[in-house]
Image (spheres, rainbow, N blue to C red):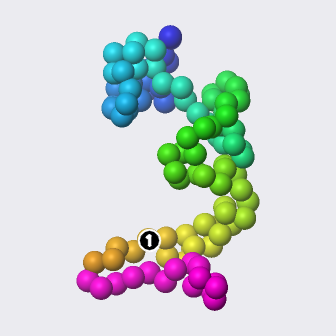
Amino acid sequence: MTVIPNSTAARDIAYHLHPYTNAVKQEAEGPLVLTRGQGIYVYDEEGKEYIEGLAGLWCTALGFGEERLVEAAARQMRKLPYYPSFGQKVQRSPWSWRSDW
């Protein structure tokens, strides 16, 4: 694999240690650089489509690009994206309006 200097792949090889990955093979072949996702699919830099079967390791179980989730996340990010729970503090849940939970 030819890796372009300062590309995502080159920086990944130089600075990112991937779990469950053969480091020698990673250095020789480089990573598969994914650029976007839609539904159950992810796409690489060349636009090739792959079925994403790991659900982003539990982070994207509902798929990629679900507009209702994007909008809900954007609303929450505008209000309070995160706050630590130290010192008996808790951030109001975005699901607080649900009376059946």
Residue 23 in the image: state x and y as whole percent: 34, 21
Q: Looking at the image, can residue 11 be seen?
A: no
Please check the rendered image and state whether residue 95 is part of the magenta-colored stretch, yes or no.
yes
Q: How many residues crowd around disc 1 within 10 Å: few (fewer than 14), some, or many (20 or more)?
A: few
Q: Quadrant of residue 36?
A: top right
Q: Residue at x 34, y 16 (%)?
A: 24
* The residue positioned farthest toward the left in the image shown: 87
Q: Is residue 52 above or below residue 90?
A: above
Q: Residue at x 71, y 30 (%)?
A: 49
Amino acid type at circle 1 is: Tyr
Residue 94 in the image: state x and y as whole percent: 57, 78
Quarter of the picture containing the C terminus is: bottom right
In screen coordinates, is 51 left or right of 14?
right
Q: Looking at the image, can residue 22 be seen?
A: yes
Front-most of residues 16 and 55: 55
Q: Characterize the magenta stretch by its predominant secondary structure.
A: loop
Q: Quadrant of residue 83?
A: bottom left
Q: Is residue 85 above or below residue 70?
A: below
In screen coordinates, is 82 left or right of 77?
left
* The residue positioned farthest toward the front in the image shown: 100
Q: Is residue 88 above or below residue 66?
A: below
Q: Which residue is mark 1?
A: 82
In screen coordinates, is 68 left or right of 74?
right
Residue 65 in the image: state x and y as whole percent: 70, 52
Instruction: Find the magenta span and give its range.
Output: 87-101
Please check the rendered image and state whether residue 88 is part of the magenta-colored stretch, yes or no.
yes
